[in-house]
Image (spheres, grey):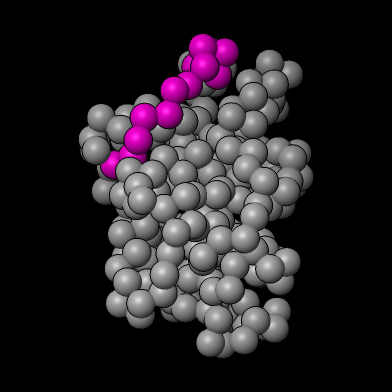
Amino acid sequence: MISEQAWADAELIWDFHQMHHEPRPCSVAVGLGSHDLGVADTTVDLYRRGMAPLIVFTGATSPTTRARMPRGEAVHYRERALELGVPPEDVLVEPAARNTGENIRLVRALLEDIDHPVDSVLLVSKPYEERRAYATARKLWPEVEVISASAPMTMVEYVASIGDAKLVIDMLVGALQRLQLYPEQGFMTQMPVPDLVLAAYQRLRNEGFTSRLIAAAPR
């Protein structure tokens, strides 16, 4: 049972993880691979709204996606986009990336290889990964404008879609820990965290929402 205080703390962190950018037309839409096929659906919706002429899905597999997406996250995302009617020539795949840094570096290299000009990127992720993805892109692709996007969901709706409130809160806490640790390791730009958010994060850690924390350097 999630306490009222823990739920309030989690919703505060959920809101902080989102950049609250207004989508606008960009050179390319990049869908970051994960367990959540909704990222592909959101990317396709933005494409249909004229927010990008080209989609790139990026991601290999991980322990949490190997069984569900055996051909790789990006490949399954592309298959979903084709099911939704996106022309094949408008959906590219970067199938090797195994973390967010590789997502950005390898997509950048792919677009350079095909001479697709890029001055802005519509970066599509899970709702609670927007800020971390944005900070990573700003570090590794600083010359382009980055617009963050995700499915327009409340935390209540996201928990319902996952079916496990504790797991979702664990993921929120883990993502915030990475926001604090990764800049020191050179993986992303520094993103200041308000004191209220830090206090909520510490309370949740103290209550045991810790399964997604890392003890050492990331993979």
- Residue at image location 65% in from the left, 52% down from the top: 23
Q: Main secondary structure of the magenta part?
A: loop
Q: Nearer the viewer, residue 161 or 56?
A: 56
- Residue at image location 52% in from the left, 17% down from the top: 194
- Residue at image location 59% in from the left, 67% down from the top: 52
Query: Count of labels shown?
Result: 0
Q: Nearer the viewer, residue 168 or 11?
A: 11
Q: Quadrant of residue 178?
A: top left
Q: Position of residue 4 (x, y in %)?
A: 73, 19
Which corner quadrant holds the N terminus? top right
Q: Position of residue 27 (x, y in %)?
A: 51, 65
- Residue 192 painted magenta: yes
Which residue, as the protein is rendered here, is positioned at the far bottom?
88
Q: Is 151 drawn above or below residue 29 in the view shown?
A: above
Q: Is residue 81 left or right of residue 121?
A: right
- Magenta part of the chain: 187-199
Q: Position of residue 198 (x, y in %)?
A: 50, 17
- Residue at image location 41% in from the left, 53% down from the top: 144
Res 211 visible: no
Q: Nearer the viewer, residue 203 or 85?
A: 85
Res 139 visible: yes
Q: Quadrant of residue 50?
A: bottom right
Q: Nearer the viewer, residue 48 or 214?
A: 48
- Residue 194 painted magenta: yes
Q: Is residue 188 left or right of residue 52?
A: left
Q: Is residue 88 left or right of residue 107?
A: right
